[in-house]
Amino acid sequence: MTATLTPPRTTVGGTTTRLTNGRLPKWVPWTLLGATLLVVFALFLIVAAAGGEAVNVAGWMVCSAIVYLVLIYVLSAIIEGRRKALDRLVTGIVSAAFILAMVPLISVAFTVVTLGAPNWSAEFFSNSMRNIVGEGGGALHAIVGTVLITLSAAVISIPIGLFTAIYLIEYGAGKRLARGITFLVDVMTGIPSIVAGLFAYALFALFLGPGVRLGIIGAVALAVLMIPVVVRSTEEMLRLVPNELREAAFALGVPKWLTILKVVLPTSIAGITTGVMLSISRVIGETAPLLITAGFTASMNYDLFNGRMQTLPVFTYTQYMNQGIPPEAYIGRAWAAALTLIVIVMLLNLVARTVAKVFAPKTGR
């Protein structure tokens, strides 16, 4: 005869609960979190009332998180064991870190939307700041300048970055030249943006003289910042392409250049597109190099090779730093320009996702 051990049971409110089943009900962590928030808030409210101050929301959230992590670890260790308790503790720490990282992002987005959206108008998107003092005017010249300079920088940097990455992965593996290029790309990745602006300005000043300000110089400065990002992201995407695909193409007698064009690049196009968009997002908000190279102006300019050109980051900076009367009009235009820049970046990322989805290789039949 075999004896069967039955885990002890307890009766709470007429309901029988097994205490040694090794698992907390799903509602327990959430209930414990809610109770912790309420109790700690009550304590902070009492302290704030005693001192005649407002409740410290940040302190309340931090203390609640610490108390909850301690309680859930102890409760889980008693019922579920130390391994499960440690798992819940680490999960709580990771979740708290994620929430903490989202706080500034949500705060910035909320601030920009609430302060920038009320200053959006038809005039803002259809007029420049030419002959405007005080209220009125718009940022059309800055929007056009941002699009033209960023597009020119992409035209310069994307082919250079793609060809460099293809050489490093497909042709230069193990060669001294490839190692040197990789080192230089890594160094360029970390250079300050102002250095890129100074380089582009010095380069054009040699031919056009000191004090030159052109949109194309700003595009070259941004291209210097974009190239290492494009190279590194494309390089990683090309490494992910299985060698079996290359070998299959070679076995069929396909030349190497055609294998890269028809097999390798289409396979990695989604990741390459994402890397390109990351590089554009990296430079579209740069201010310092464009102040040196493209300058700023209140008039429309569609020619990259003639005259100064305004961009949205520089427009935001100049409106905020050179406030006139009334100052609210200048600050409002600065917030509206910042929101416009964020919307442009969002639209570019949506376009990149669409392109990556359309051109990604089909895996199904």
Image: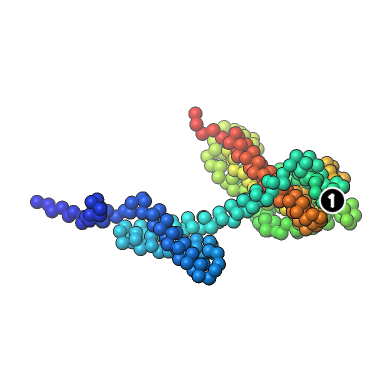
Q: Is residue 215 above or below residue 354?
A: below
* Residue 282 or residue 117, whichever sits in front: 117
Where in the figure is residue 94, as x and y percent of width and height? 47, 57
Identify the residue at image location x=84%, y=43%: 300
Furthest residue toward right: 209
Furthest residue toward top: 365
* Residue 168 or residue 293, whichever sits in front: 293
Identify the residue at image location x=42%, y=62%: 39
Can residue 332 be spotted in the picture? yes
Where in the figure is residue 213, as x and y percent of width and height? 85, 52
Corner quadrant of residue 163 = top right
| Mark 1 neighbour class, 10 Å CA radius: few under 14, some 14 to 19, many 20 or more | few
Residue for badge 1: 133
* Residue 13 or residue 85, whichever sits in front: 13
Indicate left or right for 83 with 227 as reference: left
Q: Tag 1, which secondary structure? A: loop
Where in the figure is residue 325, as x and y percent of width and height? 81, 55
Q: Is residue 22 above or below residue 244?
A: below
Corner quadrant of residue 246 = top right
Mark 1 is on which residue type? Val
* Residue 150 or residue 318, whichever sits in front: 318
Q: How many marks?
A: 1
Indicate left or right for 21 with 343 as reference: left
Indicate left or right for 221 with 42 as reference: right
Furthest residue toward left: 1
Indicate left or right for 313 with 206 as reference: left
Identify the residue at image location x=69%, y=46%: 118
Q: Is residue 56 above or below residue 343?
A: below
Identify the residue at image location x=40%, y=53%: 30
Can residue 184 be spotted in the picture? no
Where in the figure is residue 107, as x and y percent of width and height? 60, 54
